[in-house]
Amino acid sequence: MMKIANYFTPKSFKYSGIHKDIPTIIKDTHFDEDTFEVFDEHTPDASLKHHIKVVGLSDVTKIKQMLESYHIPSLLIEDVFNVNQRDKIELSDNALFLAMDVNFMKDGTFKEDYFTAVLTDHILFTFHETEPEYLTPLETLIEKSSETRKRSIDYLFYELLDSITDTHLNVYDHLSDEGARFEEGILETKTVNQEAFYLIRKRLLALKNSVTPIYEQLSRGVHKKSDLIHPDTFPFFDDLIDHLARLDSELYESRELMRHLLDLH
């Protein structure tokens, strides 16, 4: 039975972001248990697994042709160029699509980014407007981890989500410490820097908006509905869901605490 989405095709492919001056650079990492090679261009090889990282979405034609060569659906390709997507995991007949906001710390400063990913039977694509510094742990795993190299490509997709969850946990720890300092200040001096206080609340909300949608979809088993995620990878996703559940709960409690502190003030 044909899915209703297959009756519709996008009218055009257009990058919706602001980084139109950043050239499109493709880094294609080939790997398996015995192989690790990195190419500065798309280099097809169906006998190996790939992480294809695309930085800069300005060359729409180049990216579109690469994805079409793997029969990625047109509507999914269109989503790659629309950088205003809500955080989500979506399934198609031959691919799994992820859109996600990332919150991370750099030199003590809170940063936000957005990326998309496409998983096929042997490739994990990731698409970025600018260089994703937070993705370095994943690239290190491909090179150094025998577990990553020998398992199927869906395990790398799990590691992508797990790595970002660790990044979000680090951000939460930082924001939680900031919140504790506000609590001490309000209780001891009855004063608070309102601008800084509201900024922490805003960052907690941004982090929760990144964590909650992915947690909810994984907890409903969206990953188990795709043939691209193998049953032997399910336990890793179950562990990830536990981490996301804890983080989601702590974010809710922290936002409630900040609200009560504001009422107290």
Image (cartoon, rainbow, N blue to C red):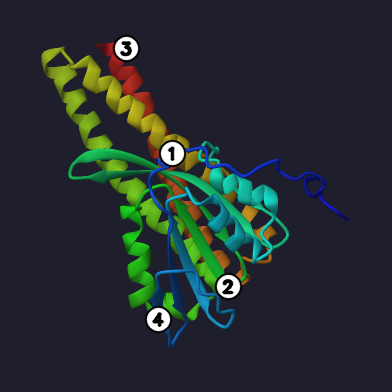
For label 1, count other residues whose C-alpha is less than 10 Å away and answer few (under 14), some (14-19) or many (20+). few
Mark 2, secondary structure of its residue: loop
Find the distance from the CA under tag 4 to the CA under tag 3: 56 Å
Q: Are marks 4 and 2 in contact (CB under 8 Å)?
A: no
In the rendered structure, which amino acid carries the disc numbered 1?
Ser
Mark 1, secondary structure of its residue: helix
Q: Is 254 above or below relative to 101?
A: above
Q: Earlier in the sequence, mark 3 or mark 2?
A: 2
- Find disc 2 in the rendering and name its residue: 122
Q: Earlier in the sequence, mark 1 or mark 4?
A: 4
Q: Is residue 194 left or right of residue 250?
A: left
For label 2, count other residues whose C-alpha is less than 10 Å away and answer few (under 14), some (14-19) or many (20+). some
Q: Where's residue 113, x and y in %?
A: 38, 43
Nearest to the observer: residue 74 or residue 154: 74
For label 4, count other residues whose C-alpha is less than 10 Å away and answer few (under 14), some (14-19) or many (20+). some
Find the distance from the CA under tag 1 to the CA under tag 2: 34 Å
- Residue drawn at x 27%, y 12% as measured from the top left: 264
Query: Residue furthest toward the bottom?
Result: 34
Q: Where's residue 23, x and y in %?
A: 40, 52
Find the distance from the CA under tag 4 to the CA under tag 2: 15 Å
Mark sitting on residue 263: 3
- Find disc 4 in the rendering and name its residue: 36
Residue 241, visible in the rendered structure: yes
Q: Quadrant of residue 27?
A: bottom left
Q: Earlier in the sequence, mark 1 or mark 3?
A: 1
Mark 3, secondary structure of its residue: helix
Q: Are marks 1 and 2 in contact (CB under 8 Å)?
A: no
- Find disc 1 in the rendering and name its residue: 249
In the rendered structure, which amino acid carries the disc numbered 4?
Phe
Q: Is 140 above or below relative to 8?
A: below
Q: Earlier in the sequence, mark 4 or mark 3?
A: 4
